[in-house]
Image (cartoon, grey):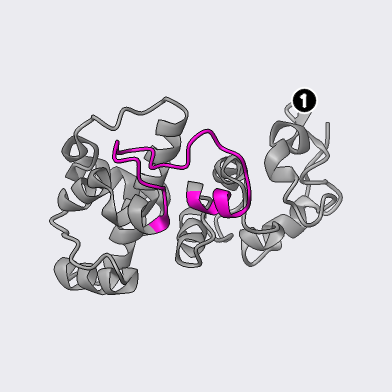
């Protein structure tokens, strides 16, 4: 069992934490780590946590990333911001991206709807009927599916608040998280979006994601 101290001699991945190492409990994420022998001190001093990994992450590695991010200090870029960076760069592991990377899946279609439509970024976050309903619970309506950046500008005008990006990032994060839950059978998309994204639940998401 390692003694943390200032972290300079404690290995983030390879030393034992509560009887096991992160390299074994987070094996998929560990496979993306640039430095397998990095110390805790260097992890906490990293300007951007995602810089410690080879990108893009697999879906399983990203899920593990969200788990391990709670272990690092708050000055490291938070996982919701990293997630949105991946989204904007089209490096988020949608089923379409996994298909382009020649990863074999049983199904490349959207996890939410029954339209047999491939799960692209635009479909998942904007075109899918479930996602559109989620945005509508905030009074946001999508007018342009061709240019996603025009949609962001439209959302900005519809929200008319200085923290409009926080609202957009939180909703995108929520849709993605629900998609992962649906893939694992933990979420039923027939649940009403209005109950999922009530004012109370959105406030909870804001504080949990620490982006306001």
Number of labels in the image equals 1
What residue is drawn where x is 16% and y is 60%? Answer: 141
> Could you tell me residue 73's position as x and y percent?
60, 53
Mark yes or no: residue 163 visible: no
Write the residue at 29% across / 40% down: 115
Q: Which residues are magenta?
A: 96-121
Compared across the picture, whether 172 is left or right of 99 comes to left
The reply to whether residue 37 is visible in this rendering is: yes
**Residue 166: percent from the left, percent from the top?**
33, 61
In the rendered view, does 121 fall on the left or right side of 63?
left
Quarter the N terminus occupies: top right
Among the 4 quarters of the image, the one containing residue 113: top left
Q: Which residue is at the front of the view, 38 or 113?
A: 113
Reading the image, the residue beneath label 1 is 19
Q: Which residue is situated farthest in the left direction here?
A: 139
Task: Give the x, y percent position of residue 84.
Answer: 45, 60
**Where's the C terminus, which quadrant?**
bottom left
Q: Does the magenta stretch mainly form a helix, a strand or a loop? A: loop
For mark 1, does the 10 Å Cα neighbourhood hold few (<14), some (14 to 19), or many (20 or more) residues? Answer: few
For residue 93: magenta? no
**On the image, which quarter does residue 204 sit in?**
top left
> What is the x, y in percent for residue 11?
82, 46
Residue 106 within the magenta-colored segment of the rendering: yes
In this picture, is 77 found above or below 19?
below
Secondary structure, mark 1, is loop
Residue 71 is drawn in which quadrant?
A: top right
């Amino acid at each position: 069992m390692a003694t943390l101290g200032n972290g300079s001699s404690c290995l983030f991945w390879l030393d034992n934490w509560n009887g096991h190492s992160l390299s074994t409990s987070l094996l998929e994420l560990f496979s993306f780590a640039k430095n397998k022998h990095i110390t805790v001190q260097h992890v906490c001093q990293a300007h951007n946590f995602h810089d410690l990994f080879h990108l893009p992450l697999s879906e399983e590695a990203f899920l593990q990333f969200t788990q391990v991010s709670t272990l690092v200090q708050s000055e490291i870029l938070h996982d919701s911001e990293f997630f949105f960076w991946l989204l904007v760069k089209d490096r988020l592991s949608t089923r379409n991206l996994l298909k382009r990377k020649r990863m074999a899946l049983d199904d490349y279609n959207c996890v939410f709807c029954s339209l047999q439509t491939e799960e692209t970024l635009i479909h998942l976050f904007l075109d899918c009927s479930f996602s559109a309903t989620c945005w509508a619970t905030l009074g946001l309506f999508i007018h342009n599916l061709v240019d996603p950046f025009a949609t962001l500008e439209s959302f900005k005008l519809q929200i008319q608040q200085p923290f409009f990006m926080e609202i957009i990032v939180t909703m995108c994060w929520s849709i993605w998280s629900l998609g992962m839950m649906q893939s694992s059978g933990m979420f039923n998309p027939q649940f009403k979006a209005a109950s999922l994204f009530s004012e109370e639940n959105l406030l909870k998401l804001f504080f949990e994601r620490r982006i306001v």
